[in-house]
């Protein structure tokens, strides 16, 4: 991933240095497990633990000749170890090392992403409670529908991000498996007991069964969890972009001192950070599709998945980490205009209360279709002729014969519409304190 979207702590995980370090951790764990089982001399395992090291430059130099990165790695380490190196990589195939180490790398990356998800949820919760009772028009199909609150919009996002966290946590656990089962997964040269001990040392679970590789449906599940996380980030960012439109202007992403929105129009404050998140979410969806393509491989393994994963795993985790932090920063600095929200809510002259009138008339015994016709004819006049909807309702002979003036006023009562907000918050946040 390019530096523009790489945060330092995630970038360090996917360096060649850290990747080879994880490979070495696996190799050493195998040697120690074999020594414990009496399969290689204990002194050899001690020598390997003591002397094993590598140089990234040297590995790359050897790889130019071998055209095989694991062989280049093992050869480089062997140069440092000496005679005991004959026990290095004993009975292993490349994927025993690469796939097991990859689980360690994904574990590190997942912990960073989950921490950012937690930070984002905290920002959402704080903002939701701050604007719990701030009325805003709810829009369906982009058109005014009924009143809601800005806090409810944010509470819904908090709830959704909780599902993303659970999915990612589950997917991270799913890929937390290693394998040391040999070229076709039969343990022809290394026993299941050694695999179990190696995985125990590394903090992984052993894959119950494997071929030459850990099966790629696990990776596909993980990448789809990242894609869903990105889709939610895009959803939230898209809403902020809509709210920032000039005609709406109910909320906008922060605009820093000295920031410029356009090279030609000095007045512009564009939602560029939200737009960036929307664009990057497309990449995550593409990576998820690529991971699904990696599931069907030839027989016990081919190498078509390898080149894909060299891109999608570092890039996917890096983008998910970056996007989640960016969205949290947007929310923490979000500029909110409650008065504009109320102004837009009331701009239709009360049309957003038409549904309440329909319910009230039906409960009074008016056939629903007839009640709908009565309310709609007033609504269409109010909309087309820019008249006050409540006045038209009060003056309609059919409606006023059924509903009293007090009942009509109650139908247009904003607090009545929003009377269950506290209950929804209790359901979303449960026993958590505000």
Image (spheres, rainbow, N blue to C red):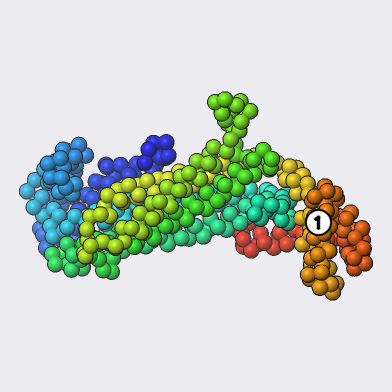
Tell me: residue 195, above or below residue 363. Answer: above
- Residue 132 visible to the viewer: no
Residue 326 placed where, x, y %?
51, 42
- Quadrant the C terminus occupies: bottom right
Residue 187 vs residue 390, the one in the foreground: 390
The image quarter containing residue 58 is top left
Tell me what residue is drawn at x 62 percent, y 45 percent. 242
Tell me what residue is drawn at x 54 percent, y 37 percent. 272
- Quadrant the N terminus occupies: top left
Residue 278 placed where, x, y %?
51, 45
Residue 406 vs residue 401, the one in the foreground: 401
Tell me what residue is drawn at x 16 percent, y 64 percent. 190
Q: Quickly name the residue at label 1.
A: 379
- Element under label 1? helix
Relative side of 129 to 301, left or right: right
Relative side of 305 to 414, left or right: left
């Amino acid at each position: 991933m390019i530096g523009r979207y790489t945060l330092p702590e995630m970038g360090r995980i996917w360096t060649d240095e850290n990747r080879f370090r994880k490979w070495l951790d696996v190799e050493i764990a195998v040697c120690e497990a074999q020594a414990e089982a009496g399969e290689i001399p204990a002194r050899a395992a001690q020598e390997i633990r003591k002397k094993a090291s590598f140089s990234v430059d040297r590995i790359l130099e050897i790889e130019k000749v071998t055209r095989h990165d694991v062989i280049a790695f093992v050869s480089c380490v062997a140069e440092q170890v000496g005679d005991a190196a004959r026990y290095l990589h004993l009975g292993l195939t490349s994927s025993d090392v690469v796939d097991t180490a990859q689980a360690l790398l994904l574990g590190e990356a997942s912990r960073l992403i989950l921490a950012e998800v937690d930070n984002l949820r905290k920002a959402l919760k704080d903002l939701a409670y701050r604007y719990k009772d701030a009325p805003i028009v709810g829009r369906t199909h982009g058109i005014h529908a009924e009143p809601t609150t800005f806090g409810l919009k944010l509470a819904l996002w908090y709830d959704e991000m909780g599902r993303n966290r659970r999915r990612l946590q589950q997917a991270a656990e799913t890929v937390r498996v290693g394998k040391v089962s040999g070229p076709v997964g039969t343990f022809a040269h290394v026993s299941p007991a050694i695999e179990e001990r190696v995985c125990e040392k590394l903090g992984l679970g052993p894959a119950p069964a494997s071929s030459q590789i850990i099966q790629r449906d696990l990776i596909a599940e993980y990448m789809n969890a990242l894609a869903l996380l990105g889709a939610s980030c895009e959803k939230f960012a898209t809403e902020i972009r809509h709210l920032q439109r000039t005609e709406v202007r109910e909320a906008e992403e922060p605009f820093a001192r000295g920031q410029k929105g356009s090279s030609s129009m000095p007045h512009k404050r564009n939602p560029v950070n939200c737009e960036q998140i929307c664009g990057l979410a497309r990449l995550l969806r593409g990576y998820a599709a690529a991971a699904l393509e990696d599931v069907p491989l030839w027989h016990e393994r081919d190498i078509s998945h390898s080149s894909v994963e060299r891109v999608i795993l570092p890039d996917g985790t890096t983008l998910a980490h970056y996007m989640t932090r960016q969205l949290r920063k947007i929310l923490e600095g979000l500029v909110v205009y409650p008065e504009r929200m109320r102004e837009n809510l009331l701009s239709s002259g009360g049309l957003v209360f038409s549904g309440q009138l329909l319910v009230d008339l039906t409960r009074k015994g008016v056939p629903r279709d007839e009640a709908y016709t009565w309310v709609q004819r007033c609504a269409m006049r109010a909309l087309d002729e820019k008249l006050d909807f409540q006045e038209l309702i009060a003056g309609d002979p059919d409606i006023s014969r059924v509903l009293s003036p007090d009942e009509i006023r109650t139908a247009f009562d904003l607090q009545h519409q929003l009377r269950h907000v506290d209950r929804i918050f209790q359901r979303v946040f449960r026993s958590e304190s505000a």
